[in-house]
Image (cartoon, coloured by chain):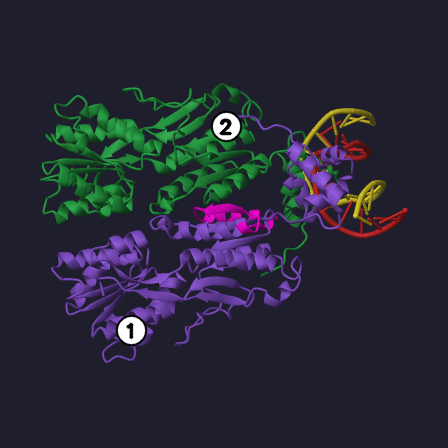
Chain colours: A green, B purple, C red, D yellow
Amino acid sequence: MTEAVSRPTLEAVAARAGVSRATVSRVVNGGDGVREPLAERVRRAVAELGYVPNQAARSLVTRRHDAVAVVIAEPETRVFADPFFALQLRGISKELTAHDNQLVLLLTEGRDDHARVARYLAGGHVDGALVFSLHLDDPLPGLIHDAGVPTVFGGRPDWGGDTRAPGPERPGRAGGNPGVVYVDCDNRGGARTAVRHLVDLGRRRVAHITGALDQTSAVDRLDGYRDVMADLPGGSDPRLVVESDFTPGGGEGAMRTLLDRCPDVDAVFAANDLTALGALRVLRASGRRVPEDVAVIGFDDMLPVAMEADPPLTTVRQDIEEMGRLMARLLLRGLSGGRDRAGATADTPPDGGVILPTTLVRRASA
Amino acid sequence: MTEAVSRPTLEAVAARAGVSRATVSRVVNGGDGVREPLAERVRRAVAELGYVPNQAARSLVTRRHDAVAVVIAEPETRVFADPFFALQLRGISKELTAHDNQLVLLLTEGRDDHARVARYLAGGHVDGALVFSLHLDDPLPGLIHDAGVPTVFGGRPDWGGDTRAPGPERPGRAGGNPGVVYVDCDNRGGARTAVRHLVDLGRRRVAHITGALDQTSAVDRLDGYRDVMADLPGGSDPRLVVESDFTPGGGEGAMRTLLDRCPDVDAVFAANDLTALGALRVLRASGRRVPEDVAVIGFDDMLPVAMEADPPLTTVRQDIEEMGRLMARLLLRGLSGGRDRAGATADTPPDGGVILPTTLVRRASA
DNA sequence: ATGAAAGCGCTAACAG
DNA sequence: CTGTTAGCGCTTTCAT
């Protein structure tokens, strides 16, 4: 464990280059308005001394940090059961890095942590926040809003606008906050595509195993399922929908219930790939063949899961990494809004959500 | 997207409480040496104004940041195939949070990013670093060492000390850096336990599918396998070892090779659970029963993988989250070494590595 | 185009 | 115990 050593300051570079601190500062920050011979001398001095600006000192005066907080609530550790979160992070990281921003990760374990996160955000340590609000009743979004930090949400928050996709209106809570920005995939549309595919395959008893319904993604996927089933004769049989929780274990239980209630089920749209995995297992154990007897479609296209499933899973793909990247881009754009880049005001982040498209990936299960 | 507002300063609090800035500062930082009536007045002023210290200003003078960088190299995106990394992060986050430290995440995509990371670390933005050096030839450890930032490694770096567990010496590179601190699990010992278990089961043709051998964990597990096989008659048959890469696909290929070379194989120790998964699949496809015909053991005890495998996987468990927590604890302890806490010098971080124990978890596959 | 000087908000001696 | 004072390293007017 090495001790950190004292590093050269602007002053040192200035001395070495025989100029003033102000000049060095100018060169370091883009070098506008410094004539070439001088600028070059400064650059050499910087290189020779291995000068790196002190971010704390800089922040103190500029009031910018070039850092963004990523807040992830993980009450049930479900986040870690699938690589979702890692992919998202990766997308975010790439985008932030490209814009020389740092990523400060805030993982919350439960209610106690909310205050800590809110305090941190309110403390002005970061320029903005990227927040994954997983649960409908999560107080975090509110706290964050109060903290007054520019924020982009991952996944539609419950109090935000509704899914863009058309379809029967859902109740929706208290007016819908107008200022909220979020990125989500087209859960509802993706679900519709999946179910329609099943119907086009000639299936008539199409069931749905939902995700945890305290998350908007699960609700939206259920809505999508209902959108297309509503038009089918006997499609709104409530026994065809069984609630689950996005886990393989939950999928198993749900599939058993389903088989019990409707032994004639000939297709299942599972809320995600993990759920589909559990369903697959139960189906196999029950002696049914997939897809011959029962067709199965998942959601997410979590590669290691979907590809390795037996049979390989037909599923609705969403570009998770791109979602992360987009969130970061939106935030950064908002932060520099009308300030740094000329004309950036023209394309400020949209109020409301940005919905990324989904695509059906056909494999063997449907 | 809300705009951040200007926040109250120490000065404002001091004015409101009718004291000097120094007094407020004292109260805010633990309140030693401020008499109660005053301290209370200050606390109230802080609360009323919603004062939060400006970290940049503080860092500027203290030269501490209460922030730690976590560097994760993910060249092949393998990191995201399993939840390993997420668990580790969680452990780290918990420990850092408990000590009011922030987590700055640095994900590297390849060689180009190394310079960026090195610069950041050298830039003195953080008090220390937690580094996961995945590959043997990774230049990152060297760069980081040069940056002069206190560092704890996750997983034994190749140029560090050897595994603590006794056993045949490995060559090891250039003298072994003495100052390096790392946390790892007992890969070698765990492997030995697994293989011994297989042998105790009466298996005589015990094979090993290795991990990616450019990672010390894979090498150490292979060494552990060899440790016990060396004593067995015919145990050092080289055909029983086939190199793979920690992935399910790799496991499949390796298992096929194995079956081809040694159709009489009656046990397989896979370098990790994912590999075991692939092996299981090929074994099943070949008509062999597990564990009756071939016993299989994995490594990691990645719950969603090991439990959901068919049959559920017997595996070597390592406490990943605890590894993360321990890394953070070690780093933090080193940072405050002899400074903050009185007597902390007594238990400074150990030079060399800390090896966490592993345990064999018996399920159905062996 | 370059330099001089004034802080940003805070902590840490040092006085009293 | 409390207040005064002097910077931490940098950016940014404002002169020149």
**Whether residue B299 can be seen here:** yes
Nearer the camera: disc 1 or disc 2: 1
Q: Which residues are magenta?
A: B98-124
Amino acid carrying mark 1 in the image: Arg
Q: Is B104 part of what is drawn in magenta?
A: yes
Check residue A333 in the rendering and tell me which mark sits there, or answer none. Answer: 2
Check residue A42 in the rendering and tell me which mark sits there, or answer none. Answer: none
Q: Chain of mark 2?
A: A
Amino acid carrying mark 2 in the image: Arg
In the picture, the quarter occupied by the C terminus of chain A is top left
Q: Residue at x 10, y 38 (%)?
A: A263
Q: CA distance from mark 1 to mark 2?
A: 58 Å
Check residue B196 in the rendering and tell me which mark sits there, or answer none. Answer: 1
Q: Is residue B53 left or right of residue A214?
A: right
Toward the viewer: A178 or D14?
A178
In the picture, the quarter occupied by the N terminus of chain A is bottom right
The location of residue A181, given as percent across then percent down, is 45, 26
